[in-house]
Image: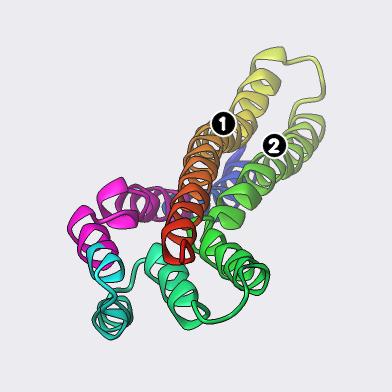
Amino acid sequence: MFNQSELLTEFFLYPLILCSIIALAIIIERFYSLRKSKIFPEEFLSNVEESLKNGDIAKAKGMCLLSKTPISKIYLTIIDNYKNSIGTMKLEVEESGKRAYLELEKNLEGLSAITTIAPLLGLLGTVVGMIKALSAVSYQSGITNPHLLALGISEALYSTALGLIIAIISFLFYKYFASKAFNFGALMEDTASRVIAFIKQD
């Protein structure tokens, strides 16, 4: 009776499944990348700052060039501008900090997009499924069989439920990672200010 509506509903489930896979991949990647030990490796920070305090600029710069962390790029900017005025240095560090912050927010726009797209895909699947269910009931048995109508509608509603589940989970993780990125960004700013203070204290 509702083979066509079921097929159409299943058709809309495929992009929802794809959205869930993409969301899961982003969540795993962000959990791995947004770790304090990865953003602020203690050994690297202590070695670079010790080299700067000792006046060994070349060694500190070498360590920053080898490191791939966002904070190392800010340190490198400070080192490259340590002979400039403190105003110029702060402007350069601010620009470097913006770029580093973008790395912290990497892929979050994709997760945000899924929170919008998933429920819309689910709703579209439900609407199409209900249209086909109502058409089938009207064509084959009239509208006097509520059981068949309820069966078709319930099948069609699965896509909306799945879309909402994906969107809710994606939104919660988006807010979590956005908050974590913001906190790390503030910590990078404090760290940069501290390094500028002691490198320009002369």
Instruction: Please report the bounds of the magenta region as a residue range.
Output: 22-49
Seen from the viewer's position, the closer of residues 15 and 83 is 83
Of helix, strand and loop, which mostly describes the magenta segment? helix
Q: Secondary structure at mark 2?
A: helix
Q: Residue at x 63, y 42 (%)?
A: 115
Residue 64 place in picture, x, y as percent: 32, 76
Q: Residue at x 60, y 32 (%)?
A: 164
Residue 179 place in picture, x, y as percent: 53, 37
3D distance between C-alphas at marks 1 and 2: 18 Å
Q: Is residue 4 above or below residue 83?
A: above
User: Looking at the picture, which amino acid does disc 2 mark?
Assistant: Thr
Residue 168 place in picture, x, y as percent: 56, 31
Q: Is residue 74 above or below residue 84?
A: above
Q: Is the C-beta separation of discs 1 and 2 under 8 Å?
A: no
Sequence-wise, the earlier of marks 1 and 2 is 2
Q: Secondary structure at mark 1?
A: helix
User: Looking at the picture, which amino acid does disc 1 mark?
Assistant: Ile
Q: Which mark is residue 2?
A: none
Label 2 Cα crowd, 10 Å radius (few <14 / some 14-19 / many 20+): many
Q: Which mark is residue 126?
A: 2
